[in-house]
Amino acid sequence: MSRVVSILPSSDDPIRTHDDLLAVFYEAAASPGPARVGPEMEKCGVHPADFSPVTYEGEVMNVLVDLAAHHGWKTDRERDGGPVIALEKNGASVTLEPGGQLELSGAPAHDVHGIERETREHMRELAGISDRLGVRWLGIGFHPFAARQDLHWVPKARYATMRDYFPKVGKYGVDMMLRTCTVQANLDYTSEEDAMRKMRLSLAIGPLTTAMFANSPYLEGKPFGGVTMRGLVWTSVDDSRSGLLPALWRKSARFDDYVAWALRAPMFILKREGDAISATDQTFEDFLTHGRDGIQATQADWRLHLNTLFPEVRLKRTIEIRAADAQSPPTAYALPALYAGLFYDARAEDELDALVEPWTFDEVAALRGELWKTGLATPFAGKTLAPIAEKVIDIARGGLQRRARKDAQGRDETIYLDALASLSARGKTPAEDLMDKIGTGSDAKKKLVELTDLAALQG
């Protein structure tokens, strides 16, 4: 049974008991309401004239200022007088990744049709300022043209600490920050048991998700030899805060298991009176026990720390599906559609549970070292991932049909799976489809921009 938290702590409250660490999760589970999907879509900006990347000081700041001035977005700064680093409006936000990637975190939607409507509006708002700046926004999992040194750092406090920390613990942490883009689906849960089941099943199909949505075959203007450079990057970032969370594969797993893992991860920063204090030499567990220079752990510190953990599926007030590359227009809405179909229909969730039942953690974890190169052709369970992807899509399709959420034309949410299903039936990833269409001619870069340009989502 899930325990009940009767008095929820505020962000400034010190953490006194173990229950204080669990409060954020029980609060979410105790908030009834219809199931919603929260979308997050990142995109990288380029100048199609010369394929150079955007910078914060140049184009990105101008984009934020324009959206605030002309489209009703409220600006957000880390400190008074500091640079604009985010926007908020009607439950949605526009935020920045370290290399200037622009992210729309949409308001929680009751169906994927709502996600599409909000994304269309966002791209329409971007159109004018983007045209004036000569910028195109690309839906692709890894910046297809820029080298590390071509990108400028967004002036956000924790990014400087992360830039110094990641090279000490992995090969690709800086690339993850500067050059990757993702699409994410955030799911509601109704109880501890519901959350843990969704976590277990999502982790089990995490590598399969990476393969199905592989969409980053280019590195610095050329094919790199695989289908997801972003997938390769995530094999060596920071093992202490990423991966597939083996403790959560047990059917008896609880919130406590996630908390225990999170406590062992190093912190990035603490924030006090607008200042950022680097704390990478201390796990949260050690900080909770011993403090730091007279500072004691608060709820705000804990929630900040939870935001700096990067497993393939992350637990916060929602369950965050984080395993997919950013998508080009044909499959832009496929990830939220897939997971809504799998987890917001009881029969579909049972069918998925039965499918993954024979899989072991070690077998699934081993996929991460292979699928970045071979995608749906990667061997698994006596076959390749392609027919398994088809089965998962079929399960999700059934769930969406039974949900029966219709748009103005009477179409249900299965329309958002059609392009992905067609690719999987041919054993292809979005990356391979993209490369087939681009070819190897002298205009390959131009075609890449045209095919991944998210302006097409304006409708």
Image (spheres, rainbow, N blue to C red):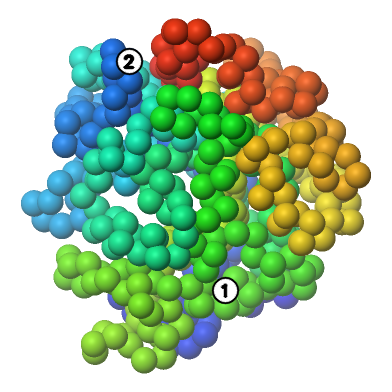
Q: Residue at x 60, y 59 (%)?
A: 243
Pinpoint residue 344: horizontal percent, then vertical percent: 71, 44
Left/right of residue 277 with respect to residue 307 in the rendered view: left
The amino acid type of the residue labelled 2 equals Pro
Q: Residue at x 51, y 77 (%)?
A: 264
Residue 3 vs residue 88, the one in the foreground: 88
Q: Residue at x 76, y 61 (%)?
A: 361
Whether residue 275 is visible, yes or no, is: yes
Q: Is residue 266 above or below residue 313?
A: below
Pinpoint residue 411: horizontal percent, then vertical percent: 68, 18
Q: Badge 1 is on which residue?
A: 261
In the rendered image, the quadrant that contains the N terminus is bottom right
Q: Residue at x 38, y 51 (%)?
A: 174
Pinpoint residue 453: horizontal percent, then vertical percent: 43, 18
Residue 253 vs residue 137, the one in the foreground: 137
Q: Residues within 10 Å of mark 2 (few under 14, many from 20)?
A: some
